[in-house]
Image: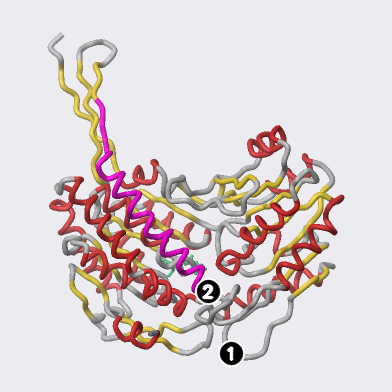
Amino acid sequence: MSDALIRDVPKQLFIAGGWQDAESGRTLSVDNPATGEELCLVADASPADGGRAAEAAVAAQPAWAATPPRERSEILRRAYEIIISRTEELALLMTLEMGKPLAEARGEVAYAAEFFRWFAEEAVRIDGGMMTAPDGKNRILVTRRPVGPCLLITPWNFPLAMGTRKIGPAVAAGCTMVLKPAPQTPLSTLALAAILKEAGLPDGVLNVVVTSDAAGVVEPLLRGGHIRKLSFTGSTQVGRILLAQCADTVVRTSLELGGNAPLIVFDDADLDVAVEGTMVAKMRNMGESCCAANRIFVHTSIADEFAARLTARMAALTVGPGTEPGIDVGPLIDTAGRGKVDDLVRDAVKHGAKVLTGGELPDGPGNFYPPTVLTGVSTECAIMDTEIFGPVAAILTFDDEDEAVAAANDTDFGLAAYLFTQNLDRALRVSERLESGMIGLNTGLVSNPAAPFGGIKQSGLGREGGRVGIDGFLEYKYLAVPTGA
Ligand code: ADP
């Protein structure tokens, strides 16, 4: 099935509703992280191709903005149905290009599709308002309009869901788009574009440019004056660069950037729940998630017990190619990603951390890294302010609530946080004090299409998903009408 899937998936740029090679004829290689081997070649866009994609989006904008909301809703709904009906193919495609085990890839297909179902329902609920001004002289009519052509930039860790989380609200709002997926995982996005075309999305509404020259293709688009909105998910470092580029022409921005999630286990936690929640918060997607628990703070009185239980669970996981049955942990995305994880573990050990399981690079092909538990992690370690993005649980201890909260907040980031306690007062008190856009209370999973996803501090601007997810793609327009009073 894999060979046929790779043979049939689109490998060209998707511009104005058609599939095209790059103008230069260049291609880039998409590799399987489980083997290091090439899966296929995909058209590699130059800035000129990016410009054509933007022109197509700009040309399609007026007619698309004028479509009835129900029509946009039904396109999303049809795309949702098609995605669900092709769960197996899409999951396998994602596993092949990204590495996650098939079971997780199936979970992502469902999660990704849900953004389309959710925004299909939101598309027909865009409302406005009318009121009389306090002095009685004017009627104030407020309507909502699409912001205009958008540039969407997605990362490789959730190739399908990061696309649908941005495309869904853009389609619902009536915006056209240029989407630039990560070069490591373009196939899921190209398959998604084909599905949207099949679902009836008009030509030019979505354009997909895959490129190995992200900086070269993106900067002229942001400075060109036609793109009205950037929605970016990726590193804080790149987010900062893009925010600066958006300044010139005051492009609206939504940024989902890096995290450094604290996970706090209090001495009154249910340890079974805490260990299970930590496994999810740490190991979902092999730890390659901006919501992954990066720093695990455990009350001193239960630290040994917690570490022993977590170590038993981590050591029992099966590592291998995500396409094989029974695999819990697939490869990391590339050798650079794995090298970074290895460096962070070595740095922690140098600072006195103890390795309870894992910690050694395996021999053989593929970017595999073993599930690893570190205890006695010093606050001097690079892990304290670096996203691990791998299957490494770094455990620190604390003695009281104030200390835990201060340590958790001692970071420039504020995306996700997790806390485990059975004490309701403490749960609410600590949640209120944690500087974080999202908090999991006695759970390791916060992502949900119906919830506002996003961070504070240097983790980003704006929210995706939930009732507010469409806001970033809409402007307010106010019409003043004298009452004659
Ligand atoms: P990661 O380290 O997880 O790959 P990045 O922030 O580098 O995160 O990448 C996220 C997305 O941003 C990818 O689609 C990538 O190609 C894109 N990207 C990286 N650098 C730039 C840049 N200078 N300008 C625009 N997009 C970029």
Within-10-Å neighbours for mark 2: few <14, some 14–19, many 20+: many
Q: Give the side of residue 54 with respect to residue 151, left or right.
A: left
Give 243 or 334, whichever is nearer the viewer.
Answer: 334
Q: Image point 46% across, 45% down: which residue?
A: 452
Confirm if mark 1 falls within 8 A of ligand 1.
no
Image height of 244 relative to 18, above or below: above
* Secondary element at image label 1: loop
**Which residue is labeled 1 in the image?**
365
Q: Earlier in the sequence, mark 1 or mark 2?
A: 2
Rendering coords of residue 295 (x, y %): 70, 57
Image height of 179 relative to 358, above or below: above
Give 437 or 422, whichever is nearer the viewer.
Answer: 422
Give 355 or 350, whichever is nearer the viewer.
Answer: 355
Q: Give the side of residue 209 with respect to residue 165, left or right.
A: left
User: What stretch of residues is rendered in magenta?
Assistant: 101-129
Give the quarter of the image for residue 2: bottom left
Image height of 374 relative to 211, above or below: above
Q: Image point 47% across, 64% down: which residue?
A: 107
* Secondary element at image label 2: loop
Display colour scheme: secondary structure
**Which residue is labeled 2 in the image?**
101
Give the quarter of the image for residue 307: bottom right
Frontmost of labels 1 and 2 is 2
Image height of 250 relative to 24, above or below: above
